[in-house]
Image (cartoon, helix red, strand yellow):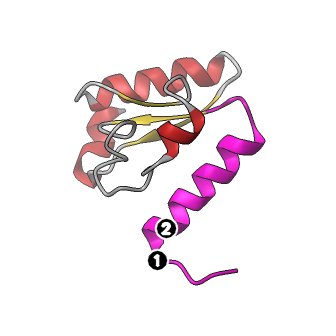
Amino acid sequence: MPEMNIVQAVNSALDIMLEKDPDVIFFGEDAGYFGGVFRTSDGLQEKHGTHRVFDTPLSEGGIAAIAFGMGINGLRPVAENPIRRLHIPSL
């Protein structure tokens, strides 16, 4: 296994899960087209499509609500909220 930094490792893990499980969906602020605030999803939208890797509005509560809704409907959402101080308010 090649040596990776944390951003590369997260990107690789997301890529593997998106490839293996069609129910995995990844989304967040700038997570799609731009590859995420810290580029953890760079290239994933191009590879897996806009229906599986996409951007959300700048609304942490909205991101959490989307994830909860997807989860209770059988999908496996992975919601990116890269700013730690916004985790609690999003719940």
Name the residue: 25% across, 27% down: 59
Q: Residue furthest bottom?
A: 3
| Amino acid of disc 2 | Gln
77 or 65: nearer the viewer: 77
Q: Determine whether, in the image, residue 71 is placed left or right of residue 38.
A: right
Could you tell me residue 2's position as x and y percent? 63, 81
Q: Dot 2: what SS?
A: helix
Q: Is residue 84 left or right of residue 69?
A: left
Residue furthest out toward the right: 20
Q: Quadrant of residue 38?
A: bottom left
Residue 43 position within the rendered picture, expressed as x and y whole percent measured from the top left: 46, 48
Task: Please identify the dominant SS of the magenta region.
Answer: helix
Q: Which residue is mark 1?
A: 5
Residues in magenta?
1-24
Q: Position of residue 36 (x, y in %)?
A: 34, 47
Name above or below for residue 20 compared with residue 63.
below
Give me the residue at 73% from left, 31% from top.
Answer: 22
Is residue 6 inside the magenta stretch? Answer: yes
Residue beneath the point at 35% across and 37% down: 33
Q: Are marks 1 and 2 in contact (CB under 8 Å)?
A: yes
Measure the alpha-carbon separation of dots 1 and 2.
5 Å
The residue that mark 2 highlights is 8
